[in-house]
Image: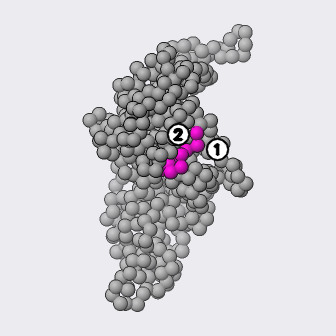
């Protein structure tokens, strides 16, 4: 991100208060738990938390981008508490607020919320010239809409901005619909269901197809470039308008913790990644990774958060091996994520390499299931493979992102997959899950299919045909599909 063009966060800031204690008895006059209070913590919530997270990494303060927060604050003691919390972390631009900042108080026993009490709120005043200038100079804008009026007040300015500036919109059922042209919209599963209706068979489903359908439908309705529906422990689904095969991004680790703030972390991470030049697919992958690490490290309760966002713990190094089955068993035994992909990889090209690199980033090891020469010939006809099996193994093994290779003779790798039992099976995004015979096999042990973006025009078929045409040779036979 250019150093002179900040990331601007727009939205409703809250004051979040956690009252911590223990509850071991009931009140004598009602069947209600009694909380013995030990301590109380204040922190910025809503857009204030999103801005804090956006500016908190990388840990080296010298390399952090400038983050500007445009929000509405009043003159109450709660509003001053929010100012004091935010001022050391972001550049604060205020809209006037007639009333007070919303305060959300959670009563927590042994780290688990018992009750939440909400109070406060007000009416957002007029837009200032300073705020307009900040929006005009933004590289990327994150709208963190909590339905309290800031996004509504700035809607006209944001609508113009989306025509030439990256806008990420984190919506709320009580808030504004995203302005047309948003680069990425990040509803959670519940919000997407509340915001989307239809008579499609998957309209009310809680499966990946249902979440993907709603993401694509909302992207069309909102005229946004992409919608990432966040699924909590299950990761996220990324869809574009009219998408029939959305991309699924599974979590990189199993997490059991307080999810408060995870959605803000996801949106802030995605906005930062897009500002740094990432594609929506790459931004979604990074957002899943960081939000999982955020929850695993304690979420908003982690004291280290306020000195820097905890990054995902590095996975133990994996050594390349000739025994793919032993590698899969080893990674599973230590709680890691086994990722596998498959194909002929006849002429290794940029599309293959990009897909393999992205696949490796989704877990702790990558195993390539490679069609043998016999399998390739049966599938694609005489003249294939162009590159013999031993050479294909040698080339793949030379890639840092490939940890092991397993060869299979059948048309599809179901038998091999049952031996490897990967958590994730990756294919390029030019496939649809309904065309993958491996999908039902993965479901036997709870594995998931992940479609990753694929570079258009870089198929083995296209390369072979161009080479044949260039040299005036006869085209190889059986080149109906890429691999």
Q: Quadrant of residue 80?
A: top left
Tell me, yes or no, whether the highlighted magenta stretch contains residue 370: no
Which disc, if any, is residue 303?
Answer: none
Is residue 66 toward the left or the right of residue 188 in the image? left
Q: Tell me the SS state at disc 2.
A: helix
Within 10 angstroms of label 2, few (less than 14), some, or many (20 or more) residues?
some
- Residue drawn at x 42%, y 48% is 165
- Whether 98 is drawn above or below 310: the answer is above
Q: Is residue 133 visible?
A: yes
**Between 411 and 345, which is closer to the camera in this rendering?**
345
Is residue 56 toward the left or the right of residue 181 in the image? left
Within 10 angstroms of label 1, few (less than 14), some, or many (20 or more) residues?
some
Is residue 33 toward the left or the right of residue 447 in the image? right
- What percent of the width, then of the height, locates residue 96? 48, 24
The residue identified by callout 1 is 195
- Residue drawn at x 70%, y 56% is 200
- Whether 222 is drawn above or below 117: the answer is below
- Residue drawn at x 48%, y 14% is 77
Magenta-drawn stretch, dominant element (helix, strand or loop): loop
The residue identified by callout 2 is 155
Quadrant into which the N terminus falls: top left
Q: Which residues are magenta?
A: 176-188
- What percent of the width, then of the height, locates residue 387? 37, 78
- Whether 138 is drawn above or below 31: the answer is below
Q: CA distance from mark 1 to mark 2?
A: 19 Å
- Residue drawn at x 51%, y 66% is 430
């Amino acid at each position: 991100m250019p150093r002179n063009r900040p990331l601007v966060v727009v939205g409703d800031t809250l004051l979040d208060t956690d009252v911590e204690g223990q509850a071991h008895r009931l009140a004598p006059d009602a069947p209600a738990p009694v909380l013995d209070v030990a301590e109380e913590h204040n922190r910025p919530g809503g857009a204030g938390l999103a801005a804090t997270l956006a500016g908190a990494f990388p840990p080296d303060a010298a390399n952090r981008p400038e983050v500007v927060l445009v929000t509405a604050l009043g003159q109450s003691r709660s509003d001053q508490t929010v100012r004091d919390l935010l001022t050391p972390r972001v550049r604060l631009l205020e809209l006037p607020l007639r009333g007070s900042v919303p305060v959300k108080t959670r009563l927590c026993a042994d780290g688990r919320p018992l009750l939440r009490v909400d109070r406060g709120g007000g009416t957002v005043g007029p837009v200032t010239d300073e705020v307009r200038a900040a929006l005009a100079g933004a590289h990327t804008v994150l709208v963190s809409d909590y339905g309290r009026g800031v996004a509504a007040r700035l809607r006209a300015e944001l609508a113009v901005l989306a025509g030439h500036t990256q806008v990420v919109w984190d919506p709320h059922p009580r808030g504004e619909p995203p302005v047309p042209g948003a680069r990425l919209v990040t509803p959670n599963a519940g919000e997407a269901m509340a915001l989307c209706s239809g008579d499609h068979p998957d309209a009310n489903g809680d499966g990946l197809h249902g979440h993907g359908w709603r993401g694509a439908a909302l992207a069309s309705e909102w005229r946004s470039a992409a919608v990432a529906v966040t699924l909590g422990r299950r990761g996220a689904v990324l869809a574009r308008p009219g998408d029939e095969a959305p991309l699924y991004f599974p979590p990189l680790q199993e997490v059991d913790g307080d999810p408060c703030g995870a959605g803000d972390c996801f949106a802030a991470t995605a906005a930062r990644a897009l500002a740094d030049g990432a594609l929506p697919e790459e931004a979604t992958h990074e957002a899943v990774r960081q939000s999982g690490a955020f929850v695993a490290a304690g979420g908003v309760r982690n004291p280290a958060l306020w000195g820097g966002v905890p990054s995902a713990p590095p996975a133990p190094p994996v050594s390349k091996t000739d025994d793919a089955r032993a590698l899969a068993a080893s990674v599973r035994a230590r709680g890691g994520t086994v990722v596998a992909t498959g194909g002929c990889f006849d002429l290794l090209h940029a599309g293959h390499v990009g897909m393999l690199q992205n696949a490796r980033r989704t877990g702790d090891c990558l195993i390539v299931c490679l069609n043998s020469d016999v399998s390739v010939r049966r599938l694609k006809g005489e003249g294939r493979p162009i590159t013999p099996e031993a050479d294909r193994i040698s080339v793949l093994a030379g890639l840092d992102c490939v940890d092991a290779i397993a060869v299979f003779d059948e048309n599809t790798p179901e038998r091999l997959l049952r031996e490897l039992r990967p958590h994730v099976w990756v294919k390029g995004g030019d496939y649809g899950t309904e065309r993958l015979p491996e999908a039902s096999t993965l479901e036997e042990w709870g594995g998931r299919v992940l479609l990753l973006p694929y570079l258009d025009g870089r198929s083995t078929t296209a390369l072979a045909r161009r080479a044949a045409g260039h040299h005036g040779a006869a085209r190889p036979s059986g080149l109906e599909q890429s691999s």
